[in-house]
Amino acid sequence: MTMLTTNFEFTLEKYKGKQTRFACPGCGHQGTFSRYINTATGEYLSPYCGRCDRELNCGYHRKPSEFLSIRQPKQVYNYPQNSAAYRYREAAVKTIEAHNLIDRELFKKSLSGYEQNKFTIYLTGLFGELVTQKIIEKYYIGSSNHWKGATVFWQIDGTGRIRAGKVMLYDPHTGKRVKEPQRCITWVHKILRMEEYSLRQCFFGEHFLKSQPLQPVAIVESEKTAVIASAYLPGFIWLASGGLNNLSPERLLVLKGRKVLLYPDSNGYEKWMEKTKHLLPGLDIKISDLLERKATEDEKKAGYDLADYLTKHPFYEQQFDDAELHLPEARKEEFILNEDPYDREDEATFTETAVDCQSTYTFSRNVKGEDWDDRIIRVEQFADVAARWTGSLKLDRATTILDVSKFYKAHLEVVLSNQGISTYLPYLERLEKVVEILSTSDPEMFSN
């Protein structure tokens, strides 16, 4: 009796224009999804209850019986294996067995030996000791003696499970991978000869996602590029796919509901562009053509990547405007405000739930030197003036501050917390630049 009543009460909505067709929850196509309505009230049932018109390529069809308390077995749909709905379902049901994870004690032991680690030596030359230390601690970069001075990039998922460890050897002067006399790249499970282990990769850096739910994500191919970009452009969570072909449905599933920007290497743009045409539902992914426009033909052939582009510029001299970087509109302000990439709140949360250890970084920390008291006193005097400033402000040729008050407050906090540490001097210099511009733009504000 219930079944008969249900069949009569609900029906697929008839076509009455574009407003009666929706995006399919299965394949994501716009205007192909018919929803079930209550024939008595005209109200829609669940937004997931309906049928996709793309029967061959998708096949998504959820009946009212699946969303109501009806005594009948739930139907199992066999979606075409080439459809997005099939790929989405397959990605969602995969689990990771214990024998496919790396032992935590082994992982902890790798978090040392940085005075010999050739990649961290390269980073120190690029960013200095303090920033390098923070990078190591944030990404849990490890060391390996498989090759003298080798680096381990651990893949840790959002629950703290250690999925894999990629071992590579770098030139400490150029930051390039060592390929002669042999290609120095392997995996921890291969070194340990873990016979039952089956590789189940996730994004490098994926452990950041849970603790930063609103932060936009940027994805590059190599782990090295993600690490370097995280210092230059801290407004994003930087992930690495680990290779050109690794943007699989299983991995992308963790990015539902986020704004995602892809930065493929210059020779991978077309392939990643093709992947963005077949996205799973709930994904907001765009691809940057920055390297396509900037790289020469020779650079493209050599696999020119974002790290190559960024390291051409001085670390603390911001020379990238919003349009050039294709930043999401809503995050332009954070790009400017969030220039200190090493807020530890996210790592503290992750440490409590997943990895209860710290790397034993042995380089010396920067120590306080120059006295900034007089300079700080001067910029503090104009905090109220900055708070009253409305509109944007052009700091230099390539940097625009959208909210002067927030920018001023954030920079002043960094300066007060790190007075005298040379690494943070650019923050003070930017504040002084703001004071100079504001006083030139409107002298009367400074006399009030």
Image (spheres, helix red, strand yellow):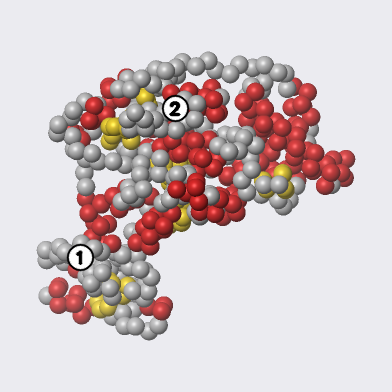
Q: Residue at x 38, y 62 (%)?
A: 277
Q: Position of residue 180 (x, y in %)?
A: 36, 30
- Of mark 1 and mark 2, the one earlier in the sequence is 1
371 relative to 363 in the view: left or right: right
Label 1: which residue?
80
Q: Position of residue 2 (x, y in %)?
A: 15, 73
Q: Nearer the viewer, residue 310 or 176?
A: 176
| Quadrant in the rendering for residue 136 | top left
Q: Position of residue 227 (x, y in %)?
A: 46, 35
Element assignment for label 1:
loop
Q: Amino acid at mark 2?
A: Asp
Label 2: which residue?
171
Figure quadrant of the C terminus = top right
Q: Residue at x 20, y 65 (%)?
A: 80
Is residue 258 among what the camera can see?
no
Q: Position of residue 223 (x, y in %)?
A: 41, 37
Q: Residue at x 22, y 54 (%)?
A: 90
Q: Amino acid at mark 1?
A: Pro
193 relative to 106 in the view: left or right: left
Query: Mark 2 Cα within 10 Å, few/some/many (few <14, many 20+)?
Result: some
Q: Is residue 328 above or below residue 4?
A: above
22 relative to 57 in the view: left or right: right
Query: Mark 1 Cα within 10 Å, few/some/many (few <14, many 20+)?
Result: some
Q: Residue at x 48, y 44 (%)?
A: 304
Is residue 149 among what the camera can see?
yes
Q: Is residue 324 above or below residue 227?
A: below
Q: Nearer the viewer, residue 288 or 239?
A: 288
